[in-house]
Amino acid sequence: MNIKRIVRGISRRIHSCNTYITNRFERRRLKNAKFILISNNCWGYSLYGNIGRPYNTPFVGLFLFPECYIKFLENFENCINLTVTFTDNSRYIQTTPGYPIGILPNGIEIHFMHYKTRQEALDKWNRRMQRLKESMERNTPIFIKFCDRDGCEYSHLQRFHKLNFKNKISIGIRIFNSKNHVYTPKLEDPQCGCALSGNLLYIKRYHYFDITEWILSGQIHRTLWSRLFSLVD
């Protein structure tokens, strides 16, 4: 037991050290970079905190099921101007979850998984949506991410890669023929047979690409830095 505790302690220290180094790396590289991150779940939100930026995206602390997410992106200019109301029921979940479920007039569900009340979810959605619109008016580049979990089907990936967004990436354990898709079979959630949850998938980001390189150049690939970071994560 003592050996196990020692090993866990060493592992935690290594992880903390690697997190500190990657945060410093991202702050330095992205110091002057302008970007908007949009994701189907919690992937990427901590980048804002790492580099000391306010959220200019409402896609924080929530998730959308694939059909609703793709529909939102396909009708992006319209959806960002729609009013969120709330419902007690979801077409995707049989039981009532312990978090607010937002819904747009076109039926798109927004699952505010990390919010305690509807009012909190609404206030933060509206505030961050306003920042997104202001950032878009300044022509801030938008970066779109999608991963193959929560019932993602091959057709969702096809529709995602047809979207008219310059910077987009899909990540998952499913093979898909696109330069903007990253195949990550080692990052599978064994409980659901799909990609890891958004936050865990983001923690492992340097295992499959360099997020700073993507934001700065639009290129999706591993760099020397990402390979080094992944060795100790």
Image (cartoon, rainbow, N blue to C red):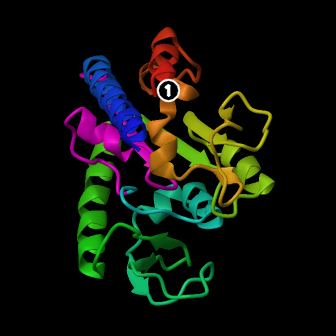
Task: Identify the image quadrant of residue 102.
Answer: bottom left
Name the kind of residue labelled 1 in the image.
Tyr
Examine the structure image and report whether residue 57 is included in the region drawn in magenta: yes
Q: Is residue 195 left or right of residue 157?
A: left
Q: Nearer the viewer, residue 199 or 89?
A: 199
Q: What is the crowding at mark 1: few (fewer than 14 residues within 10 Å), some, or many (at least 20)?
A: many
Q: Residue at x 30, y 21 (%)?
A: 21
Q: Nearer the viewer, residue 86 or 104?
A: 86
Q: Main secondary structure of the magenta part?
A: loop
Location of residue 140 in the rendering, given as x and y in whole percent from the top left corner: 35, 35
Location of residue 174 in the rendering, given as x and y in whole percent from the top left corner: 76, 44
Task: Identify the image quadrant of residue 124.
Answer: bottom left
Q: Is residue 152 left or right of residue 15?
A: right
Q: Nearer the viewer, residue 201 or 91?
A: 201
Task: Identify the image quadrant of residue 137.
Answer: top left
Compared to 160, does 102 lie above or below? Answer: below
Location of residue 79 in the rendering, given as x and y in whole percent from the top left corner: 47, 64
Q: Residue at x 37, y 60 (%)?
A: 61
Magenta segment: 30-58
Secondary structure of the residue carrying tag 1 is helix
Examine the structure image and report whether residue 83 is included in the region drawn in magenta: no
Residue 148 showing in the rendered view? no
Compared to 80, does 37 lie above or below? Answer: above
Location of residue 207 in the rendering, given as x and y in whole percent from the top left corner: 55, 27
Q: Residue at x 29, y 25 (%)?
A: 17
Residue 129 showing in the rendered view? yes
Compared to 172, does 19 lie above or below? Answer: above
Q: Residue at x 28, y 79 (%)?
A: 117
Compared to 224, does 116 lie above or below? Answer: below
Find disc 1 in the rendering and name its residue: 206
